């Protein structure tokens, strides 16, 4: 039976899937329309077929019966859909793993075609991006039963003097590592300087290690200077109002003291009716002298002209404000919010996660024709249409009072530029970058003041690789994810558990889940029923 895996469409994620499968000892063949990425795999010893494009015509030149599974990982999802349908016609038994953003379409595809698995890179990686903006030292997040579970690092000061068993008994937490000792003995003592890697729900993680909003302190003198600064006042509006007030004051005094000897209130009433062109006729200049009539005509012309200018300015400002609101260029007054830069496939999934977690979000998107803008309006998410790399844009986003910023555009250098500019505006701003290359991401975190740099392709690659079925696991065990922590590669897995179930050595039990979806972190005293499942962690490769 053919066991090799064909990677068709060597996108960023396709490259990472090929690397993952190759590292696990699976035979991989990659069809590459990018010579640069193809050469990377070729230098690793992976068989590469170079093609001008990864479309249906290119797939027809390949013998699909020679492979046990195929991964369709092109950036063009139409190609992935076409090649999935063609592949099933040519080889009814081959396992198909297809990349699609639209999960509804993916579910319909899985229901209508046998032996196919549809995955979304953005859906797989979104929870890790979202929680990285909210938890101080995150490692990886996973969606479990419509909730988020996560692995993260904390200092031992909160548990000083306790043992691993004490911690796990008192709270819904599992200690994964203590000072790089993975799966420590339950009697291991914790001190204030211990470095812990723990597993818990997101809610518990937020209580233990949540990101706090750091407010920027402004100098009092600078505030006063800003209040007194009239540079941003429209000079035409200012002069118009001053002219109206001056003419009105002169005219009231003129008609009160000089000519018509009207009372002060009557003079004011008369001047207002003339300036506003109402002219009720109860007071008129018919029998007045020439000088008084000239003043009256000047007053009428001034009223028509100045009020026309005033109404034009006010109308212009109102339209401007509406356009700014519609186009997303109005300065926000949000505080403690998360700024999301780049509302693409990954960005919109991260947005959904943040909103689900109850966070306030402001989005920045450069393209006014972005297809996800209607989603922002539908979800009442404030947004700014501008270049997030500009400091003025970050000012409009009220960066100084934001909790964190996620740079999730499709351009690594743009994300880095946005992150560095954010730190310039607010020194201790929490920054999460989307970076394709893992090694580059690690160097960025090391040399720049960047808190987290993640690769959506690297996060999603194991899920795609595992879905091929080429990576061997126990028949009853499902591997949910693979990640690196404490210098080890760890796997999150789930397996059925019955009354006589015994977990193999070198495994860390996390929690049981019954068929109603109820979770129990007490893995020793829980009553196990027939349909319960045990979630556990293991060293990858053991």
Image (spheres, rainbow, N blue to C red):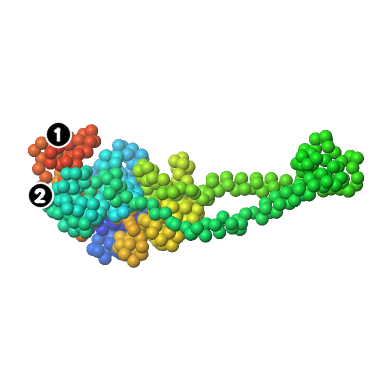
Residue positioned 27% across, 49% down in the render? 208
Task: Locate residue 534: give its quadrant.
Answer: top left
Q: Nearer the viewer, residue 257 or 460?
A: 257
User: Of the numbered discs in the image, which one, if any, rests on residue 505?
Assistant: 2
Which residue is pictured at 36% across the width and 64% down the height? 448
The one nearer the camera, 253 or 231, is 253
Q: Nearer the viewer, residue 476 or 510?
A: 510
Residue 517 in view, yes or no: yes
Q: Residue at x 19, y 39 (%)?
A: 520
Residue identifier under label 1 = 529
Q: Residue at x 51, y 48 (%)?
A: 328
**Left or right: where 44 falls relative to 51:** left
Q: Position of residue 22 (x, y in %)?
A: 22, 58
Do the residues bearing badges 2 and 1 touch, measured as CB atoms within 8 Å? no
- Looking at the image, residue 68 sits to the left or right of residue 278; the answer is left
**Position of residue 413 measured from the top left corner of the image (x, y, whole percent):** 41, 62
Where residue 135 appears, x then y in whole percent?
31, 51
User: Residue 21: horizontal and vertical position, in percent?
Assistant: 23, 55
Q: Secondary structure at mark 2?
A: loop
Q: CA distance from mark 2 to mark 1?
A: 22 Å
Sequence-first tag of 2 and 1 = 2
At label 1, counting other C-alpha atoms closer than 10 Å, the crowd grade (few under 14, some 14-19, many 20 or more) is few
| Disc 1 secondary structure class | loop
Rendered image quadrant of residue 523: top left
Q: Residues within 10 Å of mark 2 (few under 14, many from 20)?
A: few
In this view, the residue in front, 39 or 138, is 138
């Amino acid at each position: 039976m053919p066991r090799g895996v064909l990677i068709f469409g060597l996108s960023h994620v396709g490259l990472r899937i090929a690397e993952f499968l190759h590292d696990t000892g699976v035979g991989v063949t990659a069809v590459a329309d990018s010579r640069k990425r193809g050469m990377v795999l070729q230098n690793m010893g992976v068989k590469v077929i170079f093609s001008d494009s990864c479309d249906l015509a290119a797939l027809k030149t390949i013998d699909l019966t020679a492979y046990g599974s195929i991964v369709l990982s092109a950036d063009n999802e139409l190609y992935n859909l076409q090649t999935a349908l063609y592949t099933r016609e040519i080889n009814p038994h081959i396992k198909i793993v297809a990349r699609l953003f639209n999960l509804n379409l993916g579910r319909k595809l899985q229901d209508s075609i046998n032996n196919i698995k549809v995955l979304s890179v953005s859906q797989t990686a979104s929870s890790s991006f979202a929680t990285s903006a909210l938890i101080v030292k995150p490692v990886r997040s996973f969606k479990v039963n419509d909730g988020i579970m996560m692995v993260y690092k904390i200092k031992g000061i909160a548990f000083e003097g306790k043992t691993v068993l004490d911690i796990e008994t008192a709270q819904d937490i599992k200690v994964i590592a203590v000072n790089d000792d993975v799966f420590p003995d339950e009697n291991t003592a914790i001190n204030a300087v211990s470095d812990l890697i723990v597993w818990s729900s997101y809610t518990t993680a937020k209580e233990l290690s949540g990101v706090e909003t750091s407010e920027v302190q402004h100098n009092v003198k600078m505030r006063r200077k800003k209040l007194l600064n009239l540079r941003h006042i429209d000079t035409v509006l200012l002069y118009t109002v001053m002219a109206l007030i001056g003419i009105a004051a002169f005219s009231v005094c003129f008609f009160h003291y000089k000519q018509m000897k009207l009372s002060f209130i009557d003079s004011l009433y008369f001047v207002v009716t003339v300036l506003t062109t109402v002219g009720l006729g109860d007071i008129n200049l018919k029998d007045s002298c020439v000088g008084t009539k000239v003043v009256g005509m000047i007053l009428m012309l001034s009223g028509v002209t100045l009020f026309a200018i005033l109404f034009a300015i006010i109308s212009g400002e109102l339209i401007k404000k509406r356009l700014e609101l519609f186009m997303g260029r109005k300065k926000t007054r949000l505080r403690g919010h998360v700024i999301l830069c780049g509302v693409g496939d990954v960005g919109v999934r991260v947005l959904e996660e943040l909103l689900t977690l109850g966070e306030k979000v402001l989005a920045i998107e450069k393209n006014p024709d972005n297809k996800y803008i209607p989603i922002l309006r539908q979800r009442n998410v404030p947004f700014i249409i501008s270049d997030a790399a500009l400091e003025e844009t970050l000012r409009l986003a009220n960066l100084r009072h934001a909790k964190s910023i996620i740079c999730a555009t499709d351009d690594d250098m743009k994300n880095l530029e946005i992150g560095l500019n954010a730190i310039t505006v607010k020194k201790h701003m929490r920054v999460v970058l989307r970076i394709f290359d893992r090694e580059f991401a690690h160097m960025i975190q090391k040399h720049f003041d960047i808190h987290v740099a993640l690769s959506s392709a690297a996060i999603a690659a194991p899920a795609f690789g595992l879905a091929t079925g080429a990576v061997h696991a126990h028949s009853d065990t499902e591997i949910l994810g693979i990640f690196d922590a404490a210098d080890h590669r760890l796997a999150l897995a789930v397996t059925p558990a019955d009354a006589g179930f015994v977990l193999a050595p070198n495994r860390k039990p996390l929690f049981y889940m019954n068929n109603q979806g109820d979770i129990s972190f007490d893995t020793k005293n829980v009553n196990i029923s027939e349909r319960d499942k045990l979630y556990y962690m293991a060293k990858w490769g053991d």
